[in-house]
Structures are given as C-alpha cells and as structure tokens.
Image (spheres, rainbow, N blue to C red):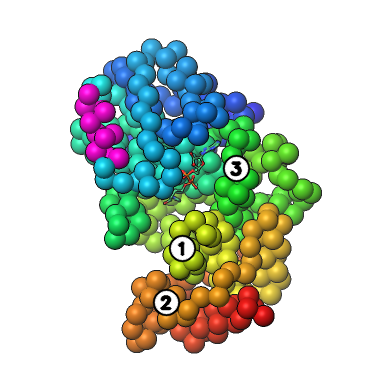
Amino acid sequence: VTDVVEVALGERSYPVVVGRGVLARFLDHVSLPDGAGRAMVVTQQPVVDAGHVAPVDAGLVDAGLEVHLHLVPDGEGAKDVAVLAELWKAAATIPLSRSDVIVAVGGGVVGDLAGFAAATYARGIAVIQVPTTLLAQVDAAIGGKTGINLPEGKNLVGAFHQPLGVVCDVDVLSTLPVREFTEGLGEVVKYGLIADPVVLDLIGSVDGDVRLRPDMLEELIHRSVAVKSEVVGDDEREGGRRAILNFGHTYGHAVETLSGYGEVLHGEAVAIGMVVALQLGQRMGRTPPEVVARGIAAIKSVGLPTVGPSLDREAVWQIMGRDKKADRGGVRFVLLDDVGAPVVVSPEPTDVDAVIGAFGQDQVG
Ligand SMILES: NC(=O)c1ccc[n+]([C@@H]2O[C@H](COP(=O)([O-])OP(=O)(O)OC[C@H]3O[C@@H](n4cnc5c(N)ncnc54)[C@H](O)[C@@H]3O)[C@@H](O)[C@H]2O)c1
C-alpha cells in the first residue's frame, strides 16, 4: 500500500508519500516542474552504499531527466557554509536552470543542506525530499525548514522552502544503524503524546523490535507524518500552533547541548525532555498522573532513556536562554493537559527547578 498525505498550503501544497518500495516510482505521485530537464541528486556515501540512491536515479532517468550525483561529506559537519558553496557551484556547473530540480536523498542533514541550496540557488528552485532516516521521514523532511549551522550555533542560517514532495520509503530504514532508528522513535512517541493516542496503543502492542513488523512501522510513520503535515498546514511559519511540535525540546535541547555532541543523540535528549515536560505538567496540576505513566512507558518500550545526565542547573537555564533569574518565568514549555491536548505555558521557575533538580538527583542516586 502507498499512502499519500497532503501538506495543505494552498498553491504550495505537496504530497508526502509513505509506503514500501516507493523509491523507484515516486514520480507517480510527485510532479516535476514544467520544463524540468536536469536533476542534481544530493546525498552521502552511506546512503549510496545502502543502495537507496540507485532506484531514485532510475526513476528520474525514466522520467527523462539528466541526473547528476553530488556527494557531500557524512555527518552534521556537512551543514556548513563551505559545503553549501560547493553545492551552489556544482549546480552552476551542471548547469541547473530555474525549472530544474534538486533531490535530497538522506537524513535530516542532507535534507536541510540540499533544501537550503535549493531555496537559494537561482533565487530558489524546486526540491524533492527523499528522507532515509526515521527522524527525517517523520520530522525533518516535512515542513520546509532548511538551513545550515554556524560555529556560533545550530541552524542559525536558513530559509523556509517547501518541497515539491516528500518520499518516505519504509524499506530504506532496514539499513539504518539501530541507535539512529531508535532515535527517530522518540519523535514518533512525541506525535502520539501531542496528537494521536493510537500511536501510543500501537507502540504498546509491539512485542520486540518494531523493525521486524514493517506493517506496523508503516502505520506509525503514516500517523506521524499525518500529524506533522496537519500542524504545518495549519501554521507554516511557527506563528503559533506549530510550537506544539517542540514538546520535549525545551529541556531536551539543554541535555543535547550540555552533554557534548554525539554523547546523547537529539532523539534521546528529546525523550528525556518529554519526561521532564510530563513531570512538570503533573507538578503544575495539568498533566494527569496516568498520562505521565503512559508517556514514560511508551518512551521506555521503544528503548529510549527516561532519565538523563545530571546537569548544572545554571547552565541549563543559560541554554534555555535565561541567564538572568528575573527572566526565568518567561521560558516556554509545551505541556500536556491530556494525551492529544498540548498547551504552551511559561511555568514558574521554582517548578522547573524542582523538576529538573529532582531529575538530576535520580540519576546520581
Ligand atoms: N528541518 C527540520 O525541520 C528538522 C527537524 C529535525 C531535525 N533536523 C535536522 O536533522 C539533522 C539530523 O538528521 P538525522 O537524524 O537524519 O541524521 P543524519 O542526516 O546525520 O543521518 C544519520 C546517519 O545515517 C546515515 N544514513 C541515512 N540514511 C541511511 C540509511 N537508510 N541506511 C544507512 N545509513 C543511513 C547518514 O549518512 C548519517 O551518517 C540535524 O541536522 C537536525 O538539525 C531538521
């Protein structure tokens, strides 16, 4: 089965295709720009080695396009201005015209980088996102956020640039290292908690490795994609509601930053941040204890951590953007009034301190 979820953004609406073995026939669902003659496929070596680029190339060639492959270095370091400049030059050398297309085949790194190249080259050309990690399929590839990092901070330079389409082939996830796969499940649990209780039921019903249940995995991805697509369609530029997607990210960001790059992966940090948000909600009398228990059970059952490293509290506040004690009441957290009922609130700093303080001691004790 192939499912197509629409991101509804008027003239810029686009399909997110979810299915098994859809790489070679994604152009059945995604229409190319009028007059497209060339495609630059941007990817990384592990994705080529895993065999996921060849079917995409074949599909583009079948559609009559001249295909150029452009490899970027592997890892987060590729979201860099020098790598971006190489991409612009490669596009100009081919040369890509305004009606041609960039195809990003890879994880969130490739999607963000190639998406930003597409947003800026020739004042913007079309991009098709072919995410090959679970995190990118359910999150990064949908919604049009693109960008690169600076030494001063992650994702500091970027643009909104919605793709022509997003192609999520469940089968490509079989070659993903297990830790990267599990990391993506954190986002899936997030969608369950903020919007779709069925996701939590499904996770609760899997006995063992969800990767051995492709039917179930496909449904989890489909439901996650549906949540993200709906929220993005409602609030493209994060003027309001899109902020609920940051559930678990306020404290998660601090964990990720303070534990050192690569120590705690983004999805693991978000899992820890979701536990903090659940406990904070309970402390504030908003989140019912059974919702807290259900969330923690889901996080555990997918193999993600529920307790994080013990962190210096002042450093945590600094990462959350509040060096000064007087400003601390303004930090925004996404909390849950119930499963499927997220709220954005600014808690009392004493409540935040109590939860993260107890959290750190848990770990030490
Ligand atoms: N734009 C957004 O809205 C958004 C949202 C969330 C995250 N992000 C960004 O996403 C990035 C993280 O993305 P990620 O977690 O996908 O990491 P990643 O892109 O670095 O991919 C992880 C690793 O897996 C390899 N890989 C990818 N697909 C594979 C496959 N099918 N088989 C084997 N290996 C494969 C990659 O080459 C890489 O080494 C961060 O830069 C983050 O800022 C963006």
Looking at the image, residue 85 sits to the left or right of residue 141; the answer is left
Q: Position of residue 29 (x, y in %)?
A: 48, 25
Residue 129 against residue 303 in the figure, above or below: above
Looking at the image, residue 154 sits to the left or right of residue 92; the answer is right
Q: Name the residue under label 1.
A: 260
The earlier-in-sequence mark between 3 and 1 is 3
Magenta span: helix, strand or loop, mainly? Answer: helix
Q: Quadrant of residue 362?
A: bottom right
Residue type (three-letter) at the residue carrying disc 2: Ala
Q: Residues within 10 Å of mark 2 (few under 14, many from 20)?
A: some
**Helix, strand or loop at mark 3:** loop
Q: Name the residue under label 2.
A: 315
Q: Which of marks 2 and 1 is in front?
A: 1
Q: Where is residue 299 in the image (x, y as percent from the top left)?
A: 66, 60
Q: How crowded is mark 1: few (under 14 residues within 10 Å), some or many (20 or more)?
A: few
Q: Position of residue 329 (x, y in %)?
A: 40, 82
Q: Can residue 262 be seen in this view?
A: yes
Contact (Cβ within 8 Å) of mark 3 with mark 2: no
Q: Is residue 200 visible?
A: no
**3D distance between C-alphas at marks 3 and 2:** 32 Å
Residue type (three-letter) at the residue carrying disc 3: Pro
Which residue corresponds to the image point at 22% horizontal and 24% vertical from the top-left?
93
Q: Name the residue under label 3.
A: 177
